[in-house]
Image (spheres, rainbow, N blue to C red):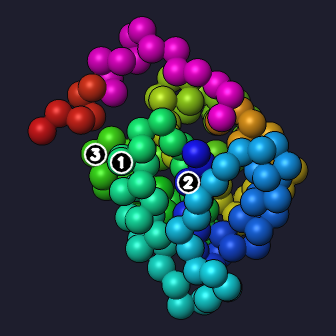
Amino acid sequence: MVVLAYDHRGYDLMQKIKPYLSSKEIEFIEFASVEYDKADSYSQFAKQANDYILENPESKGIYSCRSGVGIAIAANRRKGIRAGLGYNEKLTFLARNDDNINVLVLPSEAVDIQLAKKLIKIFLTTDFEGGRHISRLKQLDED
């Protein structure tokens, strides 16, 4: 399951991503305003999506806001969520391969639908390398 979370600045991009996911037969659930709402808040949607991901650890998230930074900060406040900005193919691959991100954050200001499709494919198909990266990630979850 792919979990979508976005605010009004990610709304247009996500309206294009949803048909793409459906065309690939990728199931998704979304936490966002049903309609464009300039007063909505990414923090609320990130919290809801994070809860879902933590309760369903096999799921992965795709979040979006204008810069991607705000919703990434909101996402990363929860232990067990590893959100990373995706704005080019190499760094998206490294974020999955090395850092085992479980949330891809797409900055709507920098990513169009064509690039988003490439980044989503990389995010959903790249496996975590493990090895030397495991100890680093365990350290993040230590109290």
C-alpha separation, residue under disc 1 versus residue under disc 3 = 12 Å
Q: Quadrant of residue 113?
A: bottom right
In the rendered structure, which disc, 3 or 2, sits on the residue that comes first in sequence? 2
Determine the secondary structure under disc 3.
Answer: loop
Residue drawn 42% across the image and 9% down it: 131
Apparent side of residue 119 relative to residue 47 in the rendered image (left or right) = right
Residue drawn 77% across the image and 44% down it: 25
**Residue positioned most to the left:** 143
Locate residue 108, reporting x and y percent. 70, 64
Crowding at dot 3, Cα within 10 Å, few <14 / some 14-19 / many 20+, comes out as few
Apparent side of residue 42 relative to residue 125 in the rendered image (left or right) = left
Q: Mark 1–mark 3 contact, CB under 8 Å?
A: no
Crowding at dot 1, Cα within 10 Å, few <14 / some 14-19 / many 20+, comes out as few
Q: Is residue 55 above or below residue 140?
A: below
The magenta stretch spans residue 47? no
Locate residue 142, reporting x and y percent. 17, 33
Amino acid carrying label 1: it is Glu
The magenta stretch spans residue 125? yes
Crowding at dot 2, Cα within 10 Å, few <14 / some 14-19 / many 20+, comes out as many
List the residue tagged with mark 2. Answer: 3
Q: Is residue 19 above or below residue 114?
A: below
Residue drawn 58% across the image and 21% down it: 127
List the residue tagged with mark 1. Answer: 55
| Quadrant of the drawing holding the N terminus | top right
Q: Which residues are magenta?
A: 124-137
Q: Is residue 75 above or below residue 135?
A: below
Amino acid carrying label 3: it is Lys
